Image (tube, rainbow, N blue to C red):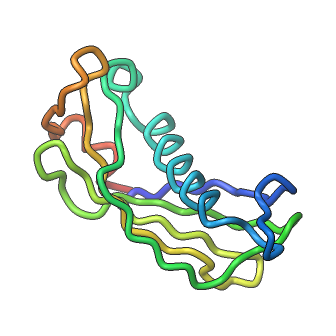
């Protein structure tokens, strides 16, 4: 497993009427994690040609954070790709060591020019599959 980590800190814009990070923000952070992982690990030639789109999110909200608090986001790919699809796990852990949000997301790779799905080859998957 080749995981990727990124820290997120809640700003006033992230906070809802309940005083904690809004659910829509968690979804944005999940997307930010996936995008940052792709850009950090993938071959730059692949980043130029392909883009990923979400096809499914399953999210478990186990806790939350308030303005000024931070979480460590961690993501990794689950298993080999299936055609154009990859399953991705994402979790956000608070400073207290507890998982606040956990997600399983499915992404499809598409060609930037044609905007059509493209099979994920072993060469594209390799940087995400091993530590």
Label tally: 0
* Residue 96 in the image: above or below residue 66: below
Screen quadrant of the C terminus: bottom left
119 to 89, vertically: above or below: above
Residue 92 appears left or right of 67: left
Taking 77 as reference, is 108 above or below it? above
User: From the viewer's perspective, is 98 left or right of 14?
Assistant: left
Instruction: Say left or right for 19 vs 53.
Output: right
Q: Position of residue 60 (x, y in %)?
A: 48, 79
**Toward the viewer: 130 or 117?**
117
Which residue is found at the position 18% from the left and 51% from the top?
Answer: 81
> Residue 99: which quarter of the image?
bottom right
Which residue is found at the position 25% from the left and 36% from the top?
Answer: 124
Q: Residue at x 63, y 54 (%)?
A: 6
| x, y percent for residue 13 | 81, 52
Q: Position of residue 45 (x, y in %)?
A: 35, 19
Q: Nearer the viewer, residue 17 or 55?
A: 17
Of 111 and 14, the residue lying toward us = 14
Say which quarter of the image contains residue 29.
bottom right
**Image point 82% across, 72% down: which residue?**
66
Q: Which residue occupies the extreme front position in the image? A: 17
Q: Position of residue 32 (x, y in %)?
A: 56, 46
In the rendered image, the residue lying farthest to the top is 113
Q: Looking at the picture, does residue 40 appear above or below residue 44? A: below
Please state which of residues 19 and 97 is positioned toward the viewer in this rendering: 19
Name the image quarter holding the N terminus.
bottom left
């Amino acid at each position: 497993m080749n995981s990727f980590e990124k820290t997120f800190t809640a700003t006033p814009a992230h906070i809802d009427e309940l005083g904690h990070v809004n659910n829509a923000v968690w979804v944005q952070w999940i997307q930010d994690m996936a995008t940052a992982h792709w850009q950090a690990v993938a071959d730059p030639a692949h980043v130029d040609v392909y883009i990923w789109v979400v096809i499914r999110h399953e999210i478990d909200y186990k806790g939350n954070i308030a303005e000024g608090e931070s979480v460590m986001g961690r993501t990794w790919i689950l298993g080999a790709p299936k055609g154009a699809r990859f399953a991705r796990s994402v979790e956000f852990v608070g400073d207290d060591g507890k998982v606040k949000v956990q997600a399983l997301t499915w992404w499809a790779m598409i060609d930037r020019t044609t905007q059509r799905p493209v099979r994920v080859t072993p060469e594209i998957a390799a940087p995400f599959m091993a530590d």
